Amino acid sequence: MALSIVHDAPLRALNSFGVAAQAERLISLDDEAQLPELHAALADGPAPFVLGGGSNVLFTANVPGTVLRVALRGVRMLGEDGDAVTVEAAAGENWDALVRWSLAQGLCGLENLSMIPGTVGAAPIQNIGAYGVELREVFDSLDAVDLRTGEPARFSAADCAFHYRDSTFKHGDAARWLIVRVRLRLSRTPRLRLSYGELGQRLHEAGIDAPGASDVAAIVRRIRTERLPDPARLGNAGSFFQNPIVPAAFGNGFCAAHPAAPTYPATLGDAPALKLSAAWLIERCGWKGIRDGDAGVDARHALVLVNHGVASGAQLLALATRIRESVHARFGVWLETEPVLVPAR
């Protein structure tokens, strides 16, 4: 199968915000056998922007150069060691489909990460996390290709340098790497994490006193459905801002000034720190539910920016900038965005 290459390609259908943009060139990678052809197509040019499910990106303008859409497929169990099972998934697989597949196989570890949008290949880049669990806790290794040389490489967890919503693939010359498959270490024995947020309370309210992994996944899905808009109905990329992590000294002063604010223990490097709730900060600044043209903030969740129709990426970014500036002016905290801004700012 020949590599698919489209010039002046529309991107509206390929991003969950549903914003209109064009790529100078769109390449779709459907099979690893196309990697040599891909290397030739990218030779002597700038690094492409790698696009997975389009659920963690905001196109703020037309994209010069190449957008590389990863559509590699395949999931398999590689082997078992006691109750531990290593699962390998291709980078283009839908993340939530992998979670559902793993639960159907009787495997545990991904239940708290249910319904996170995006692809498997994007998961380690962002070190995705939800409800007290991060990808790094189940990560084994990944295979990538150096887009400059065409050479393969394997990354261990240490190589990935995972931190909160961060990894080595966000820094330096990380754009040279194309992730092609990811391996996870799951378990046949449930080791459920129920202490974060309202998971335990929701399970109790549902009359589930001895939950399994599938029960936890179902509750996570219910909570996310209640709180987050469906991108198919209202364009969005989920949480637009990260929860800020601040030094302990600042955090203690913040807590004294705002005792009702939710906070969570965290670290900055090796130093103790506090994680603040970005949603709480934004809501206290009066942004929840606001609308400026077709760009807005979701009425149910202050972290979610939404496209009510034909908002441009530039309009959504302008709204996000106003939110950041107001939070900083009131609380002295700068919020960082979760979606990748393309073109980069």
Image: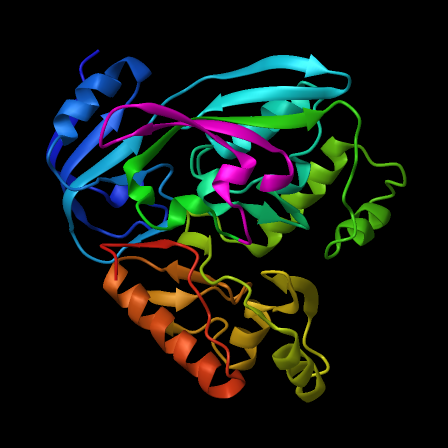
Query: 158 above or below 106?
Result: below
- Residue 50 placement, left or right of 97: left
Q: Residue at the spot x=39%, y=54% of the render?
A: 339
**Considering the image in quadrants, where does the N terminus appear?**
top left
Q: For residue 211: magenta?
A: no
Percent of width and height locating residue 228? 54, 54
Percent of width and height locating residue 229? 49, 53
Would you identify the image quadrant in which residue 68 lies? top left
Q: Residue at the spot x=18%, y=35% of the render?
A: 26
Q: Nearer the viewer, residue 23 or 166?
A: 166
Q: Residue at the spot x=67%, y=27% of the render?
A: 186
Q: Which residues are magenta?
A: 136-164
Q: For residue 143: magenta?
A: yes
**Considering the image in quadrants, where does the C terminus appear?**
bottom left
Q: State the scheme by which the image is colored.
A: rainbow
Would you identify the image quadrant in which residue 45 lies? top left
Q: Residue at the spot x=24%, y=27% of the render?
A: 28
Residue that extends furthest to the right in the rendered view of this protein: 209
